[in-house]
Image (cartoon, rainbow, N blue to C red):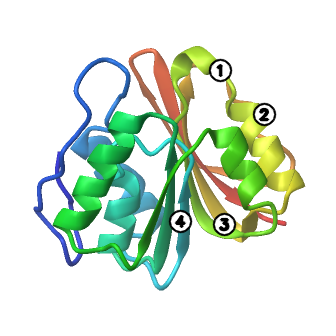
Amino acid sequence: MRIIAGKHRSRLLKSLEGMNTRPMMDSMKEAVFNTVGPYFDEEVVLDLFGGSGALSLESISRGAKEAYIFDINRDAIRIITENVQALHEEEHVKIFQMSYLDALKRFPTQAFDIIFLDPPFRMNIINEIIDQLVLQHMIKSNGILVCQYVRGNLTIPEGFVLVKHYQHGSGELAILRFLK
């Protein structure tokens, strides 16, 4: 796994071994970032299921100002920390070992420009998380949600427009824009 573009282009990232995470393939990551904007200008990013931190670090590499990465798994936090340190991005990345529920409680008034949602498929909670983000005003007007979920399990909520949709294996990836 590597950073595709920006100031850290071609830098390799560590990933968590085993079947507990599904790192996004470089081709899919490139398609996502070409859609949401190849480069950023001071955006603030939230990743509630960080895994390796690759999506947030790709955002930082492309010009995002700050990223908040959450994961409940201690090994994932270790890998994220190692990746952040390898890129010398400690100043721009905040890492938290806690559940997505605790993360939502911790930042109830913080609004984000880009939010990555890639919960474990077995949880099937994508719609509930989006509802909570909207209820707590955690996504800025014109903000982007990048959602990866079990095929057929996303209901596009009111106030969002589907920007792009991909199907892969048993999953889907949708990019939504918040218009409120």
Q: Earlier in the sequence, mark 4 or mark 2?
A: 4
Cα distance, mark 4 to mark 3? 10 Å
Residue shown at the point (44%, 45%) measured from the top left: 50
Specify the quadrant that holds the C terminus. Answer: bottom right
Instruction: Answer left or right for 30 relative to 179.
Output: left
Question: What residue does disc 2 label?
Answer: 128
Label annotation for residue 64: none
Specify the quadrant that holds the N terminus. Answer: top left
Q: Earlier in the sequence, mark 4 or mark 1?
A: 4
Question: What residue does disc 4 label?
Answer: 45
Corner quadrant of residue 88: bottom left
Evaluate whether residue 159 shows in this view. no
Secondary structure type for disc 3: strand
Cα distance, mark 2 to mark 3? 18 Å
Q: Earlier in the sequence, mark 1 or mark 3?
A: 1
Q: Decide: marks 2, 3 in contact (CB < 8 A)?
A: no
Q: Earlier in the sequence, mark 2 or mark 3?
A: 2
Q: Nearer the viewer, residue 52 or 165?
A: 52
Instruction: Answer left or right for 97 relative to 29.
Output: right
Question: What residue does disc 1 label?
Answer: 124
Dot 3 surroundings within 10 Å: few (below 14), some, or many (20 or more)? Answer: many
Q: Nearer the viewer, residue 50 or 30?
A: 50
Q: Earlier in the sequence, mark 4 or mark 3?
A: 4
Question: What residue does disc 3 label?
Answer: 143
